[in-house]
Amino acid sequence: MSVSVIVPVLDEAATITGLLDHLAALVPDAELVVVDGGSTDGTPELAAARARVVRAGGGRGPQLAAGVAAATGDVLWFVHADTRLDPRAPAALRAALADPAVVGGGFRLRFDRDTPTLRWLAWTSNVRARAGWIFGDQAMFVRRPVLDALGGVPAIPLMEDLELSRRLRRAGHRTVLLDPPSTASSRRFDEHGTVAMIVRMQLLKLAYLRGVPPEELRRRYEGERSDGEGARAERSRWRTALDRTRPVDPGFAAALARRWSELPAIARTPGQILGRHGVGCEGTHGVFPRCNLACTPCYHSRDANRVRVDGEHTLAEVESQMALLREVRGPSAHAQLIGGEVTLLDPDDHAAALEVMRRHGREPMSMTHGDVDPDHLHRLAVGPDGRRRTRRLSFSVHVDSLMVGRRGHARPTDEASLHPARARFLAMTDRLRRETGVRSFVAHSMTVSPANLAQVAEVVRGTWAMGFGMLSFQPAAFLGDDRRWKEDYREQTVDDVWAELERGVGARLDHSVLQNGDTRCNRTAYGLRVGERWVAVFDADDPRDLAARDEMFAAFGPVSFTGQPGWVVAGRVVRRLAPRPRTVGTALVWARRFVGRAGGAVHLAREALGGRVGPRTFVVHAFMDAADVAPAWEATQRGEWSDDTRVRGTQERLAACHYAMAHPENGTLVPACVQHALLDPHENAQLKLMMPRVPPRRSAN
C-alpha cells in the first residue's frame, strides 16, 4: 500500500522546509507532492529540493485535485502546510486501512497553543469528525479508488473538505478518526481573534450548506480588494457592519426599562424575560377579521365574518399599528399578523403586510389555519418578477378538532385524525425551501377544551418528529362569539393543560426558569428535541444552571437578536463577550452540562446528522373570560387597584400581559384579552358598515 502526501501551499516560505523535513522523516517511503497556489515568496523553489512540485490556482480544492492527478499512491493523505503530525500517525493510518471496510479518515485535532477556547474548538471538531465529518486540519486521508469513484476532490475554492466528507457520508463509506493528534497552527486565530475567527468559520460553513456559491465564500474569506472605489465601498460595508453589530441599541434598552417598570411586583421574578430581554409579543387587530373555518369557541366577535377582506385596508391598518408599537415598545419585537384567516388576503397583500412589519423592526409571524394551497406560499415568498421577497417566513398553524370546515377533515372526530393536515403544511414549507431557498419557522397552535384536553399528549407525541419549532396550547375561555360557547370551559385549568403537555413529552416541564409575563397566563418551556427526548435549556434543579441563566441575562439582556441575520447575531455576541471572559467561561461550562444532559457529544452529533435534533418550545397561553376582564380593565383605566381578590388578580395579569395590540386612534396599547373581550365587538360592527361582505348570489335554480 503506497502513500502519497499532498500538501497545498500559498506563500509558505517560512514553514515549507520544516514541514517537508518533518514529513520525510515521518514517512520516508511516501511520495511528497506540493501543490503551489501562486506563491510570490519563493515557496515552490524551496519545496522543489524535497518534493515534487505542481502548480494550480483557484483555491484549495483545485490545488488538491491537481495534487491527486500528479500523485501515484494508493492512499492520498492531505496535510496542510501549518500542520504537524504525531510520530505514531503513519502506523495508525496503515493499521486502520488494514480493515477493507475503512475507506479513509483523519486524526484527532489539537492546536499548538493551549487556551480554553481552542481546546473547546478542538473538542467540538473531534466530536464532529467521529460522526463522519472530517476537515482539512485533521490530516484527512482516503483510498484512491474510493476518491476516484466519487469524482475526485471537489474542485471548489473553499469548503472542499466539507464537500468531500459529505460525499463520503452520502455514499455510505466508513471513515475513522485516529487518536494520534494532528497539531494545527493557531496563527489564523492569533491574527484575527480566536472567537471572531471561530464565528467567521462557522458562518462560512453554514452559508455553504445553504447554497452560497464557493467563489462568493472565497471572496468573503479572503476579503478581496480591487480598486479605490472598491476599497471605499469595503470601508462603507465595514462601517455598516460595525453599526449593525453594535450589541446594545439605546432605544431597545430604554423600552426594556419601561416594560420592567410597568410589571406588577408578582411578575418581577428571576426568570422574567419581559423588561430584561424582550418587551413581549404584539399582534394586529381589525386588519382582516373574516375566517373561512368555524371554531368552537371563536375569540372573534359575531360580526367578524361579515367584513370583507380588503388589502388596501389591511396595509393601512398594519402600517399605523406597527408605527405606534415601534414608538411605544421600541425598535424591535416579535409581532403576529393576525385577525381572521391571513391566507384570505391576496398573496401580494400578505407579503406587503409582512414587509411593513419588518420595516418597523418587527419579526412577523403569519397566523393561519394552514388549509391553504402551495401556490399562496410560493407567491408569498416570490414576487411577480421571480425574485425572492425574503429569506425567511414564519407561521403559526392552528389545527385542532374544535375547527369545522377544513378540506378533507370537515368534522374531525379526534386530534390524531388531523396529523396528516399538520404534516401537509410542513411538507409545503419544505417544498418552498427546496424550490425557492426561502426557509420557514413553523409553530403549531391548538385550542384546548374539556372535549380534547385528554388528547393534548397525543398531539405532542404525534407531532414529535415533525418540524414544528413550537407547540402552543390555548385553554378555551368564555371570550368572543358567545354563539360558539359549547362547553363549560371552567371545568379545566391551565394546570390541567400543562399536566397533559408533560404527559406527552414524558418529562417535567419547568415554566419558572424562563417566564413571559404572568404564569397564570403564559407558561413556557424552552429546550431541544434530541431524538425521542426533550432537553431543557436550563435545568431548574441545578443551581449552576440558574446562575448561568442570570449571567446570560446580565450579558445579553439588553441585546436584541430579533429578526437579524446570522452574521449580525454572531457579531453582537462576539462584541458583547469580548470584554466578558467570565461569561465565556460560564457559557462553555453550561454548554458542557447541556450536552451531557442531551446524552453526550457523540450521541448529540449523531442525532443531529440524522435530522433528529431541533429547537422545541412548549407554550400554554390562557385567555381570560370576558366577564372577568371587564371589571378589572375598568378599575385599571381609573388608576385603581381593586380590593376584590379575583379582580385584582385579573388586573395583575393584564399589567403583565405578554401580548399587546395597538390603537393608533388614541395612541394606546391594550392587552389581547381586552381587545377580544371588550373592543372587538364594536370594532367589527363598525368594519361591517365600512366594508360589508357581499354574500354570493343564490342560483335561480
Image (cartoon, grey):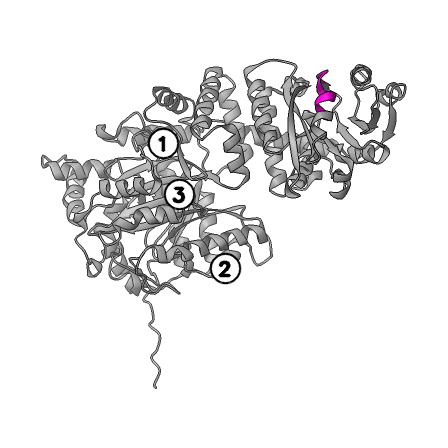
Q: Amino acid at mark 1?
A: Ala
The residue identified by callout 2 is 374
Question: Circle 3: is it few (<14), some (14-19), or many (20+) Cα within 10 Å?
Answer: many
Nearer the observer, 558 or 506: 506
* Relative to 439, 490 lies left or right: left
Q: Quadrant of the C terminus?
A: bottom left
Above or below 69: residue 542: above
Query: Under tag 1, what secondary structure?
Result: helix
CA gap, disc 1 to disc 3? Answer: 26 Å
Quick check: can you spot residue 245? no
Span shown in magenta: 85-93
Q: Which quadrant would residue 175 be assigned to in this image? A: top right
**Inter-mark Cα distance, 2 to 1:** 39 Å
**Could you classify mark 1 by the number of other residues whose Cα lies within 10 Å: few (under 14), some (14-19), or many (20 or more)?**
many
The residue sitting at 36% across, 27% down in the picture is 539
Which element type, helix, strand or loop, lies under badge 3?
strand
The location of residue 190, given as percent across then percent down, is 64, 17
| Nearer-the-camera pick, 661 or 52 | 52
* Amino acid under disc 3: Met
Occupied quadrant, residue 197: top right
| Amino acid identity at mark 2 | Pro
Q: Which residue is mark 1?
A: 255
| Sequence-first disc among 1 and 3 | 1
- Residue 47, percent from left and from top: 86, 20
On residue 25, the disc is none
> Could you tell me residue 624's position as x and y percent?
21, 45
Residue at the left extreme, as displayed? 643
Q: Which residue is mark 3?
A: 470
Q: Taking 142 as reference, is 550 left or right?
A: left
- 44 versus 263 height, above or below: above
Seen from the viewer's position, the closer of residues 418 and 695 is: 418
Pointer 2 and pointer 1: residues touching (CB < 8 Å)? no
